[in-house]
Amino acid sequence: MLPEETVLAAKDLRVKVLLPVHWAKFELAFHDWDDPIKRVTKSALENNQAITTPLIGEPVIINASYPDKTWWVF
């Protein structure tokens, strides 16, 4: 799925918080490594979809802690 399609799927499924995965692990595509997360967070904001963006390895505690820092922006 494209990042924007992921947000729409989350809306269709009525998820409480979207956790994007399988991005920023390896640079295998022709786009910038942070392009997918920029697009999915922008789309989530535009579609009023809650999203969590933990650092790789950072814990997410269901119904308690949803990290949302934009750590990919330096």
Image (spheres, rainbow, N blue to C red):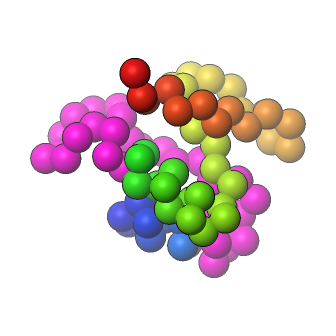
Residue at image point 63% right, 78% down: 12
Residue at image point 67% right, 64% down: 48
Visible in this render: residue 54? no
| Residue 24 position within the rendered picture, expressed as x and y whole percent measured from the top left | 36, 35
Name the chief secondary structure element in magenta. Answer: loop
Above or below 14: residue 58: above
Residue at image point 56% right, 65% down: 46
| Residue 1 position within the rendered picture, expressed as x and y whole percent measured from the top left | 38, 66
Indicate the quadrant containing the C terminus: top left, top right, bottom left or bottom right. Answer: top left
In the rendered structure, which segment of residues is drawn in magenta? 9-36
| Residue 16 position within the rendered picture, expressed as x and y whole percent measured from the top left | 76, 59
Q: Is residue 16 magenta?
A: yes
Depth check, front residue: 42 or 57 = 42
> Residue farthest to the right?
64
* Residue 57 located left or right of residue 37: right
Visible in this render: residue 63? yes
Above or below 43: residue 27: above
* Residue 69 located left or right of residue 60: left
